[in-house]
Amino acid sequence: MIVRIGPATLHLGDAYQIRPTLGFMDADVMDPPYEFRATGGGHYRKNRKGMDQIVDEGLDQGFDHRVINPLLCGAAIVFCHNDQLPKLLPYLDGSFKRQAVCIWRKRNPQPVANKHYRPVFEFYVHAWNDGYHPQGALADLDRQVTAYSPRGADKFGHPTVKPDAVMDKIMANVAGERVCDPFMGTGSTGVAALRAGKQFVGIEKNPTHFQTAVDRITATWHSIQQEAA
C-alpha cells in the first residue's frame, strides 16, 4: 500500500525490500529496532506494558546495518541503544566521510537500571558525506537535545516514539530536501520533515502504526496548508 499526502509518500511494507527501490535521498533518518536485553524490570515492569509491547513487536532484536546505504543517501541519522554503538560506529565510519554521536537527554527517564545504568540518555549518530554536513546556526549545532520522553496519549500507541522536540532539532540539522525514514513507526519523522518544509518518504511494516502515521501526517499537512492560506 502507498499513501500520498502532499509532499509525503508513505509505504506499508518491509524496509529492507522497499528502501532500495526508492532511489537517492538527501538523508535517511531512522529509529530502527534496538538490540538489547528485554528481560527484567521487576515490579516496575509489571505495572507498565511498554516493554512487553517492544518484545511482542520484535523491537528488541536489532536491525541489519545494510539498510543504511551510502550510495542511496547523502547522510544518515540512526538512533540506537548504547550497546549497539560498538558495531554501528565502525559500519558508518566505513560508509560515510564523517560522523558524530549525539544525545537525547530525557527530562523524565524511567526509574530503572536493570543491571545497567539508568536510561537518562538515548543516542543517535549523524553520519554524512561531502555536501551533506550538519546544517543550522551555531545554536542549532549542539550534539545534545533535552526533551521529555512521551507518555500516555503522546506515545500514539507505540512503545518507542520520539518526542517532537528531538525530531524538530534533527530536521534543523539535516541537509537537503528529501528525507526517508525506513522504520517510520507512527510518523514522528514525517511530521517534523513537513514542518521543516521538506519532502518525506516513510516505510512501516506494522499496519496499526502505519495508519497512525497516515493520520498524524495528514493532520500536519492540513495544518500547514491552513497556516499558509
Image: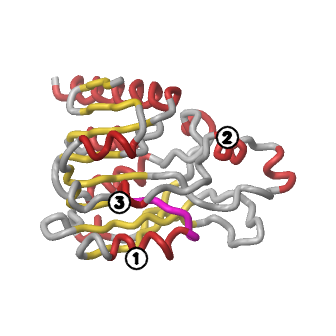
Q: Which three-letter amino acid code belongs to the residue tagged 3?
A: Ile
Outermost front residue = 17
Mark closest to the chain's N terminus, 3 or 1: 3
Circle 1 residues within 10 Å: few <14, some 14–19, many ≥20: few
Q: CA distance from mark 3 to mark 1?
A: 15 Å
Q: Secondary structure at mark 2?
A: helix
Outermost right residue = 43
How did the renderer colour the structure?
Answer: secondary structure
Tag of residue 77:
3
Is residue 35 positioned above or below 214 on the image? below
For this view, does 172 lie left or right of residue 59?
Answer: left
- Identify the residue at image location x=54%, y=57%: 62
Tag of residue 56:
2
Stretch in magenta: 78-83
Circle 3 residues within 10 Å: few <14, some 14–19, many ≥20: many
Assign the C terminus to one quadrant of the image: top left
Q: Secondary structure at mark 3?
A: strand
How far from the left and from the top, in percent, is residue 9?
A: 27, 31
How far from the left and from the top, in percent, is residue 25?
A: 21, 50
Q: Which three-letter amino acid code belongs to the residue tagged 2?
A: Asp
The mark lying in front, picked from 2 and 3, is 2
Mark closest to the chain's N terminus, 2 or 3: 2
- Identify the residue at image location x=30%, y=53%: 28
- Identify the residue at image location x=56%, y=69%: 82
How far from the left and from the top, in percent, is residue 3?
A: 31, 24
How far from the left and from the top, in percent, is residue 212?
A: 47, 28
Circle 2 residues within 10 Å: few <14, some 14–19, many ≥20: few
Q: Which three-letter amino acid code belongs to the residue tagged 1?
A: Pro
**Residue receiving disc 1:** 90
- Identify the residue at image location x=42%, y=38%: 14
